[in-house]
Amino acid sequence: MTAHDHVPPGPVAVLANPSAGRGRHRGLLPRILERLGAAGRPVELLRARTPAEAEAACHAAVADGAGALVTVGGDGTVHRALQAVAGTVVPLGPVPAGTGNDFAVETGFPADPAAAVEVIAEALATGRTRPVDLARLSRPGVPDRWYGAVLAAGFDAIVNERANRMRWPRGPRRYDLAIVVELAKLRPRRYRLSLDGVPQEVDAVLIAVGNVASYGGGMRICPEADPHDGLLDVVVGGRFDRRTLMRVKPQIYRGTHVTHPLVRAYRARTVELDTDGITTYADGERAFDLPVTVTAAPAALRLLR
């Protein structure tokens, strides 16, 4: 992996999600802006109230000549920024201040936000950037999307979808309740899966397509995924029943679930995936209904590292 000494001229645009990580890092923002400013460029805080506004603000900043984009938040905030900087020379600096910071941590940034800002500010000052892979998500009739961490296309996506529809309870307990509700209805689905053009059908409760190893705040669902190898890691959890799935779930944090006889792991450059009734989640954000095609995009992003 090579370092390149070039950050384009122009201001540093900062996208901050004030509610990331349930607001626990909100007080950090003034210090972050000050530290970035000390790297010798103007700093512009982007205004956005919703995820859609955040994404539009990132696109506008890049179009207006921003030299770099820094996110203060979790994987969702990074996901919005990726749509604007992927495939460009504008580098990204992710400050991990969310509930799930899988992309930032898995691509080598310190988990501590203040330490990550130091790394980013130093890279800005010296003009250093490093390439990292992304994944490109496609579905007929809609514009492609990029993601950096993991695409969830099974039980995990169904739980996310339910949790997002629930108004009660607030916070992480809503997610726990969604798991309980969906576990009661757990059944394998027949997936049509194609890896680099080779089709197969699998009965599975979970399929994840990873650019990095972890999602959901440290669950190592694709433990061997490497964001510098030009490949996607595909993990298929087969015909699990409720009891077996709950027994294996704690192993996902260590990445040891892949040794279970019902789990299969693959590597591919292109993954086509289809089944009925699933909306995928990429970087924890609602993405496309199946069918989708996921393509590895080697070195599609430059990081301030």
Image (cartoon, rainbow, N blue to C red):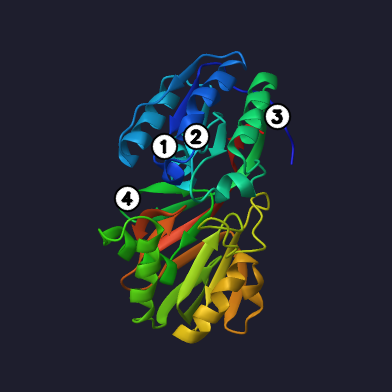
Q: Residues within 10 Å of mark 1 (few under 14, many from 20)?
A: many
Horizontal side of 159 relative to 123 (left or right) equals left
Between the C-alphas of marks 3 and 4, the distance is 34 Å
Q: Position of residue 107 (x, y in %)?
A: 64, 45
As helix, strand or loop, the secondary structure at mark 1 comes to: loop
Q: Identify the element where label 2 is drawn.
A: strand
Q: Nearer the viewer, residue 135 or 105?
A: 105
Tell me if label 4 and label 2 are in contact, CB under 8 Å: no
Upstream in sequence: badge 4 or badge 1 = 1
Q: Residue 111 falls in which quadrant of the image? A: top right
Q: Position of residue 150 (x, y in %)?
A: 52, 57
> What's under tag 1, amino acid-wise?
Asn
Labels 3 and 2: the sequence-earlier one: 3
Which residue is tagged 1? 17
Q: Position of residue 76 (x, y in %)?
A: 44, 46
Count of labels shown? 4
